[in-house]
Amino acid sequence: MNSYWIKSYPDVLNEHKSLDKNIETDICIVGGGLTGISCAYLLAKQGFKVVILEKNKIAEHTTAHTTAKITSQHGLFYKYLIDSFSKDLAKKYLDANEQAISNIKNIIDIENIDCDFEFQDAYVYTKSADELQKIKDEVTAVNSLGFNSEFITNIPLPIKNVLGAIKFPNQAQFHPRKYISGLCKSILENNGEIFENSKVYDIEKTGNTYTTYTNDYKVTSKYVVLASHYPIINAPGFYFLKMYQETSHIIGVETNQNLFDGMYINSESPTLSFRTTNYNGKRLLLVGGFEHKTGAKIDLSNAYSYLENVAKEVCSDAKVLYRWNTEDCVSLDKLPYIGEFSNIMPNFYVATGFKKWGMTTSNVASNIITDMILGKENVYKNVFLSTRFHPIKNIEELGGLVKEVAYSLTINKLNLPDKTLNSIKNDEGSLIEFDGKKVGIYKDVSGNVFAVKPVCSHLGCELAWNNLDKTWDCPCHGSRFNFKGESLYDPSIKNLEIYDI
């Protein structure tokens, strides 16, 4: 993978130090993506002593593999919120994300951050007659909340057979790593500390303080903010029972044609996303899509070529320069979890389940958590209440999640694969039976064999081979491991067991 955001801006942080001693601080933030950095920025501005622990490098994981749309338009979502919850909740969700757009722009202005920020209109469009009424209903729903959306039949995106779209004016986009670099500068200037290559593996509560363990050292603090994308602590929050992960793919396309204004996503499946960004004095086209539940046993080898064909519908001379993908956490009721990690763990906060809309939601989360630490009331807090408990809105999805976990934990482990070591070709991976047990095998292009125990180190689900990224993916909670067994994506924090065959 080669993300444009990383290639075009390789160094977010000038310092690259890891934690090398035990320290005490007011607030320990686990995770150096946009959410963790945004929280640290606001809290450091309030005079708190803040420490950030990032297991790899700042803004090089989920944040570096986004489309980076700053928008309150999260698909066709507001009619769902009104129908499933209430009009009041839907309005607060909209207002919170609209406020986030303004907040981000204000931070950019205050800190003088050069991050390619630009206002753009956002559209959800359809080519399907079956989806057209959904678009119109969404316009009605959104406008009933006091927002000025618009139904249109002609959009600036040059693709054929569009029947209609909902337009959100005055949304935005930016370069996420350039933005985070500006936040990091402010954090360090306000006596915050940022540690890279400092993987957290446990957090314990002792009296009124928390101890966060990373590498060979520990951080003691009154407050902890868990901003690690997917919570790495299973209990007592039990977020693994109410979230799953989806993977989406993105390409960056060079063209000599003049590109469009605006940001776009379709309403039907499969989902497609379009936007442009500054690139060498012209525009680079970003096309996203080919989404799937992480760990699904499907052929992914054509994901990027599929997106390339889509790009050629927009610009015939499309030349793919960048390819990357990312995971996103999705809650079963589609609302993020922001606030207290658990009712029995005071001063411990979490932000997760952003459903692919992390640019605005990270700002929403950082403001809610900052207000909670300051003891201030936040009008949006209850919309995203992380300790909420109410009937799951999507029973079908809940049943699917439970069934997948049960299958991966029990039934699937009894099914022995019919492949043998000799039947696996070079640059292929698969499960085989070896000495009466299942083994995950990958042969590289030279025929070297890498063997792992194909059981997720998180909760023990059986892993599936990803033939695009050459990774072992968990269908239960979205953990991912490279072919050497090294943990890549949360919630797993331990590497896989290695076999020598």
Image (cartoon, rainbow, N blue to C red):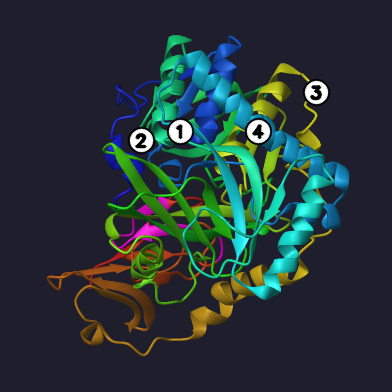
Residue 69 x %, y %: 52, 43
Disc 1 element:
loop
Task: Give the labeled residue for mark 2.
Answer: 57
Look at the image and tell me in which quarter the N terminus lies.
bottom left
Q: Which mark is residue 364?
A: 4
> Which amino acid type is marked by label 4?
Val
Q: Residue at x 75, y 56 (%)?
A: 138
Q: Is residue 215 above or below residue 113?
A: below
Residue 45 x %, y %: 57, 12
Res 176 quadrant in image: top left
Residue 152 x %, y %: 66, 56
Q: Nearer the viewer, mark 2 or mark 4?
A: 4
Q: Residue at x 51, y 84 (%)?
A: 414
C-beta proximity under 8 Å, tags 1 and 2: yes
User: In the displayed structure, does residue 105 sit left or right of residue 421?
Assistant: right
Would you say residue 132 sits in the magenta stretch?
Answer: no
Give the distance between the C-alpha atoms of the residues marked 1 and 4, in whole angstroms: 17 Å
Q: Is residue 54 above or below residue 258?
A: above
Disc 2 element:
loop
Task: Give the labeled residue for mark 1.
Answer: 32
Disc 3 element:
loop
Task: Give the labeled residue for mark 3.
Answer: 377
Give, as a single range, the part of the protein colored magenta.
476-488
Q: Residue at x 81, y 52 (%)?
A: 141
Please name whichever residue, 442 or 201, is drawn nearer the observer in this view of the structure. 442
Q: Main secondary structure of the magenta part?
A: loop
Give the distance between the C-alpha atoms of the residues marked 1 and 3, in whole angstroms: 26 Å
- Tell me the crowding category of disc 2: few under 14, some 14 to 19, or many 20 or more residues within 10 angstroms, Cα based: many
Give the distance between the C-alpha atoms of the residues marked 2 and 3, in whole angstroms: 33 Å
Please name whichever residue, 460 or 370, is drawn nearer the observer in this view of the structure. 370
Disc 4 element:
helix
